[in-house]
Image (cartoon, rainbow, N blue to C red):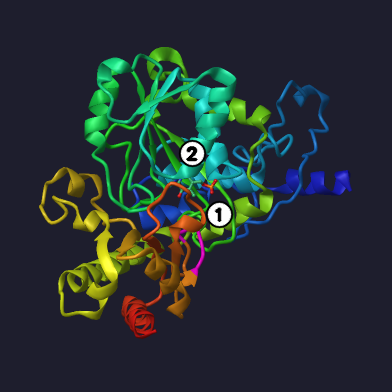
Amino acid sequence: MAGSENEISKGAPPGLAKAEPKRELALASRSIHADDNVSAHRAVAPAMHVSTTFRYSDNPDDLGYMNNQDPSAPKDSHIYSRISSPNLTRLEILLSSLLNGPSVTYSSGLSAFHALLVRLNPRRIAISAGYHGCHGVIDLVSRLSGLEVVPLDCPASDLGPGDVIHVETPLNPTGEAADLEHYAKKARESGAYLTVDATFAPPPLQDPLVQGADIVMHSGTKYIGGHSDLLCGVLTVNPRLAGPDAAGGVDLHAGLLQDRIFLGSVMGNLEGWLGLRSLRTLELRVTRQSSSATSLVRWLAAEAADSSSLVSRAVDSVQHASLQPGAEAEGSWLRRQMPGGFGPVFAIRMKEEALARALPSKLELFHHATSLGGVESLIEWRAMTDKSVDKRLLRVSIGLEAWEDLRDDLIAGFRALLDA
Ligand SMILES: *Cc1c(COP(=O)(O)O)cnc(C)c1O
C-alpha cells in the first residue's frame, strides 16, 4: 500500500500546486479561488479527508522533529489532525484571505473566545452586555486567573498594557453597531488590545481590522457556516501582530496556533470541509441577507410608528443598525464602519411579554429557534436562552427567502396574534 501511493506521489509533476493569483481579487472571487493552490490533487472540489494521522517520509534523511513536509504539497503536509489537517488548512487559508489577516479556526465560537483569553491573559477585560456565552467563558477564566471584568465604557486610565477591550459589533440581540474607531483610540491610549466579536456582520459588511482591531473573532457557526449545520470559531490576527516582524516582537498568530495544539479545541474534519463549501457563497448570501433584513426593518419600523396599522398594536419598537443615527448619512462613522450594509439580525420589542411569547407560533416561514446566520429565517423569543434579556424581546435572523414573503408571513402572524 505504502509503496504504491509513494509511486503515485513520485510520479506527480513538480509544481502541481497552482500559483497564487497575482491580481488583487474581489471578495467573491477570493472565496472561490484563494485556496486553489493548497491541494496537490487535480480535483476541482476539495476532497473530504477524515484521517487523524499522516504517514511520514520513507527517506530517513527527511525525518526531523515535527517535520513531515511533502514537496508536492507544500501547504498541505500534516502530522496529526489536532495540529493541522487538510480540510482545516484549506479552510484557514481561505478565511485568511476573506478576513484580511492570518486566521485560526476552533471547534466553536466560544472555544475561539476562550483561546483568545488564554493567549492574551489580560488582568482586566472591558466588555458590555451582549452575547451571554462570552460572559460564561470570562467567568471560567476568572476562576483560574483572577481576570477582572470592567465596564466597556470605563475611563482609559482604568486599563493598562495587556488588558483587553472586547467589543461586540453589531451587538446581540439588537443588531446595533458600536463605534470601533472610538474603542481603538481608547485601546491605544491605555496600551490595551482591542478585540472585536464581528459575528453579526461578516464580510463584506465590515472589516474591524480597518478600524484598528488587534484580533477579530467570529462564531463561524453563523454566517461562515451559513446553513445551520456546523460549529466553528475563528480568530483573525491583525497582520501587524503576526509573523516574524510582529509589532512588539510577539507573533500572535503563531502563539494561537501553538496554544490550540494543547487546548485541543480544533474543528472536526467534516466541519472543515463543510466550512469550505459554505464560504464559496459567503458574499452572495450575506449581501442578500443584509438587504432583505434592512428592507424588513424599514417596513416594520414604519408600521410600528403608524398608529393606524396592525403592527403598531403589538410592536413597541424595532432595533437595528439601519435605524441608528448616522445610518443614512454618507461619511458617518456607522457607514464608514459598515460599508457593505448592516447585519441581517434585528430585534423586535413587543408591547407585552405574552405577545413576544406567542408571535413565533403564528409564523409559517420563520422557525422558532435560537442561533442565526443560516439560509433559513429564524425568530426567537430571546428569553428562551438569555436570562438577562427583556422578556418582550424577539430576535430575528433573516435568511434567504424573498423578503416580501417574510413580510407577508409577519403580517399574517400579527393578524392571527391580535385576532386571537
Ligand atoms: C453564537 C455566538 C457566539 C458563540 O459561538 P458558538 O459557535 O455558538 O460557540 C459568540 N458571539 C456571538 C455574537 C454569537 O452570536
Front residue of 7 and 386: 386
| As drawn, 221 above or below 110 | below
In the picture, measured across the screen, residue 106 lies left or right of residue 410, that is right
**Is residue 354 visible to us here?**
yes
Front residue of 128 and 3: 128
In the picture, measured across the screen, residue 55 lies left or right of residue 376, that is right
List x then y, in percent, for residue 127. Answer: 37, 32
Ligand 1 within 8 Å of the CB at mark 2 = yes
Mark number, residue 134 = 2
Give the Cα separation between the discs numbered 2 and 1: 22 Å
Disc 2 packing (10 Å; few <14; some 14–19; many ≥20): some
Q: Amino acid at mark 2?
A: Cys
Mark number, residue 47 = none
Q: Earlier in the sequence, mark 2 or mark 1?
A: 2
Mark number, residue 275 = 1
| Quadrant placement of the C terminus | bottom left
> Which structural element holds mark 2?
helix
Residue located at (75% from left, 43% from top): 10
Ligand 1 within 8 Å of the CB at mark 1 = no
Residue located at (32% from left, 56% from top): 343
| As drawn, 415 above or below 70 | below
Q: Which mark is nearer the camera, 2 or 1?
A: 2
List x then y, in percent, for residue 200. Answer: 38, 51
> Which structural element holds mark 1?
helix
In the picture, measured across the screen, residue 166 lies left or right of residue 323, that is right
Q: Which residues are magenta?
A: 368-373
Front residue of 416 and 324: 416
